[in-house]
Amino acid sequence: MTDHQVDLAELVEGAVSRALDALFHDALAATLTRARVERYLHIVARGVAARARDMAYLDLMTSADMAAELGVSRQRVLALAQRRGIGWRAGRDVVFLRSDIPAMRPGPVGVHRRSG
């Protein structure tokens, strides 16, 4: 599990705990309606989705970030990405996930002969 996944799991646990506290704040009023439970579940789900989206942004890399990571030019990264079908367009740039780094590593330098 990455640090972001651990953080997200902790956020989910905290959100569920707070929702349960809100639902069962009064032991005498422990009668729950479907509508009340559904309302709290929607609140929890929206909060978790927003946090997950924000955390996913932390794993994104621009083409310049990828170039620095691989030690190549930005143009080389764009060429590799297009050839390998990795990354996606975001405005005038291409963005990548950190998990794309191994697939983006350039091959050996030199003349490549075609077999066949």
Image (cartoon, grey):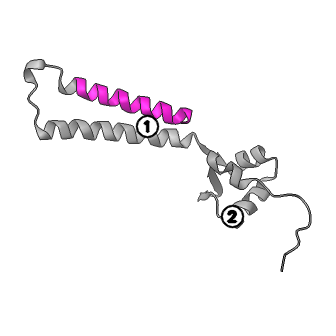
Secondary structure at badge 2 equals helix
Up-down relation of residue 6 to residue 62 (above or below): above
Query: Which residue is rendered at x = 92% and y = 62% of the image?
Result: 110
Query: Which residue is rendered at x = 69% and y = 55% of the image?
Result: 103
Secondary structure at badge 1 equals helix
- Magenta stretch, overall SS: helix
Please give the range of residues in magenta.
1-21
Up-down relation of residue 64 to residue 85 (above or below): above
Q: Quadrant of residue 111?
A: bottom right
Q: Quadrant of residue 60?
A: top right
Is 2 within the magenta? yes
Q: Quadrant of residue 43?
A: top left
Q: Report the residue marked by disc 2.
A: 84
Residue at far front of view? 116
Query: Which residue is rendered at x = 10% and y = 36% of the image?
Result: 33
- The amino acid marked with disc number 1 is Arg
Whole-percent x and y of residue 50?
41, 40
Asked if residue 91 shows in the view, the reply is no
Task: Indicate left or right for 57 with 103 as reference.
Answer: left
Is 43 within the magenta? no
Task: Indicate left or right for 75 with 50 as reference.
Answer: right
How many numbered marks are there? 2
Of label 1 and label 2, which has the lower sequence position? 1
Q: Nearer the viewer, mark 1 or mark 2?
A: 2
- The amino acid marked with disc number 2 is Arg
Q: Report the residue marked by disc 1.
A: 51
Whole-percent x and y of residue 69?
75, 44
